[in-house]
Image (cartoon, rainbow, N blue to C red):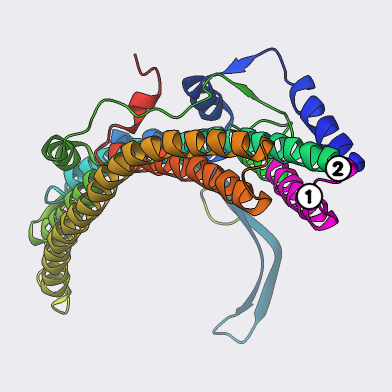
Amino acid sequence: MKRNILIITCLTVCHFAVYPQEVFTLDKCIETGLQNNFSVRISQNEEQISSNNATIGNAGYLPVVDLSGGYNGNVYDYNYDYSDGTTGKTSNINSGTTNAGINLNWTIFDGFGIQADYDRLKELKRMGELNTRITIEDLVADIAAEYYNLIRQRIKLNNLRSAVRLSRERLRIVEERYIIGSMSRLDLQQAKVDFNADSSKLLTQFETVNTSQISLNELMGLDSVNRILKIKDTVIIYSSLLEEHELWDKTLSNNALLIASQKNMTLSELDYRKVRSRNYPYLRFNAGYGYTANKYDTGDVDLQKRMGLNYGITLGFTIFDGMNRKREQRNAQIQIKNRELRIQELELSLKADMSNLFMAYKNNLELWELEKENLVAARENYEISIERYKLGDLAGIELREAQNNLLEAEERLSIAEYNTKLCEISLLQLSGQILTYLHPE
């Protein structure tokens, strides 16, 4: 027993002794996570890629200019058979062509396909920003949930410490009475068993607190994941009471997943515009300026040079392509309808989630109020029980029951507080307001 007391005392001292001076609030944890979290940083890099791609050049508005040069040479041996029956041979005849030039190719019109491509690139840029927002919102929700879980686990740790102190006091009383012969050895052994059981729960809870702390450090992207955080809040409090209709209005206008689904529909409409552009003729312009030199070892001309401008315009129209255009247009229209159905499906799913979460939110608020009353009653009941126990008017098993009732009441209150906060976090994320946890003022 003394060994258990020593271990628990050492753990308690170490738990507080290594606390750093820096105090973490929820918004500080979120700010740290936004700076360090790898998922956010990767998403921001991907957003930058989509932003880099949204240019008129990538869409095809601008011409393509190529500069090229080269040399081609030939070495031949000629054999001649003349009509009079004689023959002749010329060996190592060299000829070569040197060329250099600059060429421009420009699609002036392709049935509005270029415009559709540019609009699509801009939508993909916005999708990149939206994906970063979704990643950030997920991170904020995860950090907030783990932050309050750490508070809950530390509250439970303190409750278990109190339970161990109560069990230790009961054991002290039993030992004194056992020495003077007013209590049996059975009472003493039962008090020791209860004390050891509470001590075991306390030791296990230290591990749970440490696990929650590591999870929070990981979400914040801290290298020292074992760092013990000194957080400002010691109790869980909820924000001002949420209203369901206001949350739903915010969800329809701000929910990131719903906005992303609407963006996907816009992309499908742009794909349809791109396919329809093939119903129109195309107009292309090309021009070039080049230099060509041909060198000969035979004939009357040794070197021929040519320099000048070439240009042309091409107007074309695809008359028949195996009916692929019609097929692709029909498929694009079906895809748009599917996007509309997915939006409706998502809205229905969000509505169901909102109803379930808000019902759980209201129930947990009521449980919270009820458990606060239960805790007052359980604490008063224990105080009466311990006084009666000290007077010898109450059995040890009845005192133990009162102690367990107090611990259970404390735990139920803690769970109700935490579940209420989880519902609040989920409702705010669903309605696109989760970033209010960052700088809540």
Q: Amino acid at mark 1?
A: Asn
Report if residue 198 lies within the magenta region.
yes
Looking at this view, is 90 or 364 the one in front?
364
Q: Residue 369, how many percent across, how many down?
A: 32, 36
Q: In this figure, which residue is indicated by the disc labeled 2?
A: 4
Q: Residue 402, how many percent across, how many down?
A: 56, 46
Location of residue 180 with respect to 34 vertically, above or below: below
Quadrant housing residue 420: top left
User: Residue 70 bears which disc, if any?
Assistant: none
Looking at this view, is 315 or 397 the one in front?
397
Q: Is residue 106 visible?
A: no
Tell me: 186 left or right of 435: right
Location of residue 403 with respect to 85 vertically, above or below: above
Query: How far is disc 1 from disc 2 in space, using C-alphas?
Result: 8 Å
- Residue sitting at x 28%, y 49%: 360
Q: In this figure, which residue is indicated by the disc labeled 1?
A: 196
- Residue sitting at x 10%, y 56%: 281
Magenta segment's dominant SS is helix
Segment tinted magenta in the rendering: 179-206
Residue at far bottom of view: 85
